[in-house]
Amino acid sequence: MISATAQNNNAVQIPSMVRIKDLARILNLPVARLIKELIKNNIYATINEEIDYETAAIIAEDLGFSAISKIKNENPQEIQTPQPILDKKEVLKLSPRPPVVAIMGHIDHGKTTLLDYIRKTKVAEEEAGGITQSIGAYQIEYKKKPITFIDTPGHEAFQSMRERGARLTDIAVLVVAGDDGVKPQTAEAIKHIQSAKIPMIVAINKIDKPEARVDKIKQELAKTGVQIEEWGGDVPVQKISAKTGQGVDNLLETILLIAEMEELKASDLGEGLGTVIESHLSASRGPEASILVQGGTFRIGSLIRAGAAAGKIKRMEDYRGQTIRQAGPAMPIKIIGFNAAPLVGSLVQTGKESSAKMPEGETRQTQKILDSINQKALRPKIKKLNLIIKADSQGAKEAILENLATLPNQKVAPYIISASVGAITETDILKSQITNAKILGFRVKATNVAKSLGKQLGVKINLYAIIYELIDTVKEGLEEILEPEEEIRELGAMQVLEIFRTEKDKMIVGGKITQGAVEPQALIRARRNGEILGEGVLGELQCNKQKAKEVKSGQECGIKFIGGVKIAVNDTLEFYKIEKKKKAL
């Protein structure tokens, strides 16, 4: 028997799953009145059918009640950690959380060595050939503040894992070896960081080596679009030695400073949400999965699901291998209890048995379409648009998926994080924040809690009554992530008339603009007798001894040329910019 517990005149407690007739009893309403309200919301259920808490809550709110989640502990001996009853105000409590930092860069540039020094342990020596073979997550404390680090593989074979690493994190530390410079995988890591739109810190490593060339690396970074603070950008640069520890404290200080500016927050209330960062099958312990917690709390005894893998948390360990009973946001943990090793990168959710099973009414045809869409999105070199779809019926959901399956996907494709029937809830908002997914609701509502949390976290809820409008939004989203075409825009040319100063990888020269115009931050080709000597970057532009935003044909000016080319009088400098042109689907 389910009973109502009123916190005030309009507050009622509703369990995670409730039958229609029991919900009517809780609300003290005739069953016919409740069913009529359900039909108004396109929910057709008999008196003995069950609906979930989120759906029941939105119906209760429409009828003037304030819904509170009633979480029952059906087997208290199995689950010793009690789960709290959450009201709407508690769900919206966001607390500061530790930053999650990705260590990225080219192979053998010192990523794992840096992490080793920070953690004061030896990881690199245990890896085959000194290459990190999987993503590992670790948590340290610096000045009494925790920081979570993700070590992403640098080897070419682990491109997809490295991409996931950037999308799990708040801050990226790009490690560049001072004696080697920017390499193809460095440039690729930069693209992943910029695509994830997270702050970047450049750590120039191995500065204890005589061959280290810091200025050269800064120039190479500028060519890849990284604007460092020293040159008027927003990317801080720290010179470090992962081997000796030189500059590492400054790096950690910078991480904490950026984390404070980002105001990172999460709620540790409610069911746990996270991402699988590593999984394997242990001969002695069965399937194991390393999880980065991103919202809520993971607890011993909770049911858990990650894609097709499901189970119950039997054992939970922190990154040091110590047994723990619960874990909150930004904690890296290892979980034992899955029935199979979950896929790396899949979203993990704890919950009651009903939410850990395949949704009822899911047809084989729907699952087949869903699998087909996601398999296309996981092909190499395909950029994904993550989607969370909520529909008012299984038929509507299937129709949406069928339309999405027909979209062009040579370079971009939709990827379905979840597709289900029912109201948009706070869980959907948290999923969206974690996976950077668009929430698309078709003929459904969002709970008041979901709306408030969405506003707090900056998550947009897109609601539609017409399918083609929903599909158009997906098309627009796919066009936004299409790699734009690069076009070279020629600006002008200058004849060098005088050399004022020559330094290592830097020159100050004067000359006359012979055609077009010159702008700051331009790229430069240096020519002599028609032959290209090399390239550089325009560091500073002056006209009449004043900084200038533009110098036109016929005028004289002075420039700071940053590059390894040695310019001479009568050389020609050609100025240009590389611009990106948006592509259509």
Image: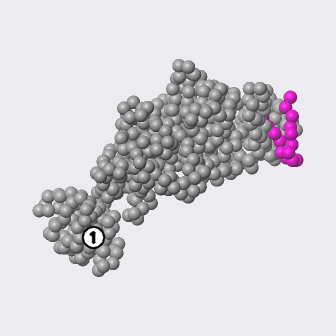
Residue nearer the viewer, 45 or 51: 51
Residue 503: percent from left, percent from top: 25, 65
Find the residue positioned furthest to the top: 283
In the image: residue 61, left or right of residue 309: right
* Above-or-below relation of 124 to 141: above
State the residue at coordinates (32%, 66%).
539
Overall secondary structure of the magenta stretch?
A: loop
In the image: residue 413, left or right of residue 575: right
Find the residue positioned furthest to the bottom: 544
What is the three-letter code of the residue carrying label 1?
Ile
Residue nearer the viewer, 313 or 358: 313
Q: Is residue 11 magenta?
A: yes
In the image: residue 443, left or right of residue 232: right
Q: Give the magenta-colored segment's residue range.
A: 1-16
The number of callouts visible is 1
**Quarter of the rendering containing residue 290:** top right
The crowd level at tag 1 (other Cα within 10 Å; few <14, some 14-19, many 20+) is: some
- Asked if one can make out residue 557 in the rendered structure from this viewpoint, the answer is yes
Residue 199: percent from left, percent from top: 48, 53
* Above-or-below relation of 272 to 457: above
Q: Secondary structure at mark 1?
A: strand
State the residue at coordinates (74%, 26%).
78
Q: Is residue 210 magenta?
A: no
Q: Quadrant of the C terminus?
A: top left
Q: Quadrant of the N terminus?
A: top right
**Quarter of the rendering containing residue 333:** top right
Which residue does the numbered mark 1 point to in the structure image? 559
Residue 171: percent from left, percent from top: 50, 50
Residue nearer the viewer, 41 or 187: 187
* Above-or-below relation of 36 to 218: above
